[in-house]
Image: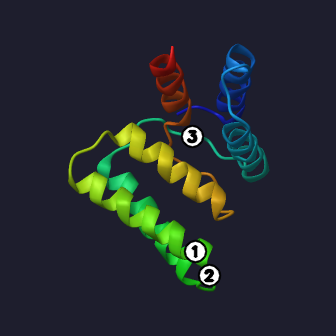
């Protein structure tokens, strides 16, 4: 399991290496993710499983039920259902995990303990080259 400092350093290094290829939206997401890791002292385990993704989807759903139903929350619920469908159809766990990380950050939730953010960012960057 990686410490939050390890993950923080990997993310900072990724930003340095790819600063010209990162969109503003991606950078905002990454910075919010780093902030959550630091504030909540999260140690991230990059070994995600279907079970961990399902548990995180359940936690996201419970958190979203506490809020008001707004157009934005409807949009996020739609994304949540899409992730569940993608999980059932056998899509890449890393890609699903990355999208789930974004929903967690968008909903101001703590960073997930199992996350593949660094892997997904590197994969995304390699595909764009």
In-front residue for pair 124/59: 124
Q: CA distance from mark 2 to mark 3?
A: 31 Å
Residue drawn at point x = 50 percent, y = 39 percent: 45
Residue 4 badge: none
State which quadrant residue 64 falls in: bottom right
Q: Is residue 129 above or below residue 101?
A: above
Characterize the local packing of mark 3: few (<14), some (14-19) or many (20 or more) Cα atoms within 10 angstroms. many
Residue lying furthest left in this view? 89
State which quadrant residue 33 falls in: top right
Residue drawn at point x = 27 percent, y = 43 percent: 91
State which quadrant residue 51 falls in: bottom left
Q: How many marks?
A: 3
**Which residue is disc 1 drawn over?**
73
Give the left or right position of residue 2, taking residue 92 as reference. right
**Which residue is disc 2 drawn over?**
70
Tag 3, which secondary structure?
loop
- Residue 2, percent across and down? 58, 31
Q: Is residue 94 above or below residue 101?
A: above
- Whether label 1 touches label 2, CB < 8 Å: yes
- Residue 20, percent across and down? 72, 19
């Amino acid at each position: 399991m990686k410490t939050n400092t390890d993950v923080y350093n990997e993310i900072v290094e990724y930003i340095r290496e790819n600063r010209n290829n990162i969109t503003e939206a991606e950078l905002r997401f990454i910075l919010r993710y780093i902030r959550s890791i630091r504030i909540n002292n999260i140690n991230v385990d990059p070994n995600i499983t279907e079970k961990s993704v399902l548990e995180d989807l359940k936690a996201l759903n419970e958190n979203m039920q506490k809020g008001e139903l707004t157009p934005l929350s409807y949009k996020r619920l739609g994304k949540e259902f899409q992730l569940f469908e993608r999980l059932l159809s056998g899509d890449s766990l890393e890609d699903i995990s990355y999208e789930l990380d974004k929903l967690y950050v968008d909903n101001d939730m703590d960073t997930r303990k199992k996350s593949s953010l660094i892997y997904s960012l590197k994969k995304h960057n390699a595909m764009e080259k």
